[in-house]
Image: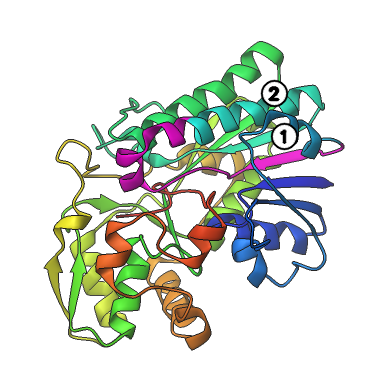
Amino acid sequence: MKILITGADGFIGSHLTQKLFDQGHDIKALSQYNSFNLWGWLEHIDCKNDIEILSGDIRDSSFCQQICKDVDVVYNLAALIAIPYSYISPQSYIDTNIYGSFNLAMACRDQNVKKLLHTSTSEVYGTAQYVPIDEKHPLQPQSPYSASKISADAMVMSFKHTYDLPVVIARPFNTFGPRQSARAIIPSIITQLLSGKNNISLGDLTPTRDLNYVVDTCEAIRLLSECDEAVGETVNIGSNTEISMEDLFSLINKIMDKNAKVSIDKNRIRPKNSEVQRLKCDNSMLKRLTNFHPKYTLEEGLKKTIEWFSSKENLEKYKIDPAISSSVFLTTATDVIGFFTFLGLSALVIL
C-alpha cells in the first residue's frame, strides 16, 4: 500500500513512519522544506534510506495535489502545535492548521485517495466539563491553537459529508516518548534532572493529563486507519487515566532516583482562561472499533523515555536551560528544521 505521512519529521510522525514501514508499506514521508535540507527526526530513524522523503509545505495547494498522486492512504500529522506561540502568532496557525488541512483534503478528493486519517488533539475539549471525556464532549477553544484544530477537524470532516471522502479523525490525548519536544513537561523534567539540577523549573502543577506512550498512540492511529467502520468518525485515543503534573514530577523523580524540588517558572504559566485544567479520555469508542488496549503503562513508558534521553547522543540534541525552552517557540534543532512537528499534542505537548 502506498502511504503519505505529512508531519513525518516530527515527534509522533517519525515513530509512525518507522512503524508503517516495518509493516511493509511503501512510504512517502513529508518534511517541511528548509534551506539546510534536513529532515527533522526522520534523520534518526532506521528506514530513512528505504523510504521516499519529500520536502515541501502543506500550505501550498498545488504541492499537496502533486504529493497525493497515486497514494492510497494519507496520514495528516502536519501542524503547528506550540500553544505559547499561538498566542503570539495566531495567523500562522490558521494558515498551517486550517488552510493546510483544507489543501490536503482537496488533494485527497481530487486524486481519489482511498482514506484520509487526520490527527486532532484533546486540547479541542478544553477544561473537562465531565470525565472521562468522550467524543460528544463540547469543544472549547481556549487558545488560538485549539481553535485552529477545531476548525481543521471541521473542515476535513466536511469533505466526508460533502464529497464522500473517506475521512477518519484520530484525537490523541497527551503523548510522550523519545524525540518529544523540550517544550513538553516530561522531557523538561528528565533533561533538567539529567543535567544535575536539584531545583526543577516547571509551570502550573495542578492540571491533570491522560498520558500515552508514543508507541501506543501510533498503534491506535494505525488501527483506526485500517478500520472501515471508523470512516466518518472522530475517535479519542487515550488510556482512561489521569495524573496531575505534580504527581508526574514526583513519579519521574522517583524512577530516576533523584530528590529534586520544584520551582514555578512564570514563563510556563498559560493565561488564566487558557489553561486546560483537566483531561481524562474515554476510549470506549476506540476499543469498540479496533479492540485497542495500551501496551505500556505510564511507568513503563516513562522508563523507556528516560532511557532514551539518558543517551549522551540524544541528550545533546536538546537545550537544557528551562528559561530558553519555556520562553521561545523554537527550542530544539528538530523544531527549527521540522516546523510541522504534531500531535499532538498540545494534544502531544504538555506545557
Looking at the image, what colour scheme do you see?
rainbow
Q: Residue at x 20, y 74 (%)?
A: 200
Label 1, secondary structure: give it.
helix
Q: Residue at x 58, y 25 (%)?
A: 156
Residue situated in front as seen by the camera: 134 or 112: 112
Quick one: label 2 or label 1, which is nearer the N terminus?
1
Looking at the picture, which amino acid does disc 1 mark?
A: Cys
Horizontal placement of 235 versus 230: left or right?
A: left
Q: Residues within 10 Å of mark 2 (few under 14, many from 20)?
A: many
Q: Circles 2 and 1: CB distance less than 8 Å?
A: yes
The location of residue 327, given as percent across then percent down, is 27, 58
Looking at the picture, which amino acid does disc 2 mark?
A: Met
The location of residue 184, given as percent across then percent down, is 35, 60
Horizontal placement of 234 versus 328: left or right?
A: right
Horizontal placement of 323 versus 157: left or right?
A: left
According to the picture, the residue beneath numbered tag 1 turns out to be: 64
Q: Quadrant of the C terminus?
A: bottom left
According to the picture, the residue beneath numbered tag 2 turns out to be: 106
Residue situated in front as seen by the camera: 332 or 184: 332
Q: Quadrant of residue 315?
A: bottom left
Q: Is residue 71 magenta?
A: yes
Q: Quadrant of residue 77?
A: top right
